[in-house]
Amino acid sequence: MQCIVHIWGSAERDRKQYLLKLFPLYSLESRRPVEEFSGEEALCRRLKEIGLSTTHLTATISSLREGTDAMWTNIDIARETLDKFGRTGDAPRLVA
């Protein structure tokens, strides 16, 4: 399934967090789960799991270090991965 991958940084309580959201490319959905990561290494592992290429990973980390968001469109992600994204226990964490 073709998706949009949006990654941004958030500084809370003197620590850097990274937030990751996936959207189906051709969807009007406005609320999707968000996954949080406490560092670059954990974020990169997750991005590899969902299928981003090394080129995307390098550009993402570079953008985040410069303080800007990273957004990729038309990324092929397995439907199962998208359906399970952001779920901990029974309910996903939703952010508008």
Image (tube, grey):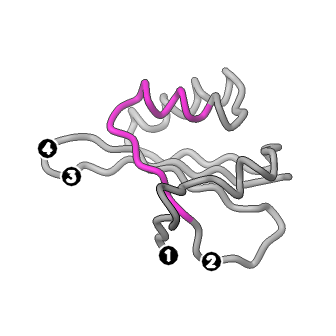
**Up-down relation of residue 70 to residue 24 (above or below):** above
Cβ–Cβ below 8 Å for labels 4 and 3?
no
Cβ–Cβ below 8 Å for labels 2 and 1?
yes
Kindly report the distance in space between the C-alpha atoms of the residues bearing marks 1 and 3: 19 Å
Cβ–Cβ below 8 Å for labels 2 and 3?
no
Disc sitting over residue 30 in the figure: 2
Q: Secondary structure at mark 4?
A: loop
Amino acid of disc 1? Ala
87 and 77: which is toward the camera: 87
Spot the residue most to the left. Answer: 14
Disc 4 residue crowd, few under 14, some 14–19, many 20+, Cα 10 Å:
few
Kindly report the distance in space between the C-alpha atoms of the residues bearing marks 2 and 3: 24 Å
74 and 95: which is toward the camera: 95
Cβ–Cβ below 8 Å for labels 2 and 4?
no
Disc sitting over residue 14 in the figure: 4
Residue underneath mark 3: 12
39 drawn magenta = yes
32 and 67: which is toward the camera: 32
Disc 1 residue crowd, few under 14, some 14–19, many 20+, Cα 10 Å:
few
Q: Secondary structure at mark 1?
A: loop
Disc 3 residue crowd, few under 14, some 14–19, many 20+, Cα 10 Å:
few
**Up-down relation of residue 15 to residue 93 (above or below):** above
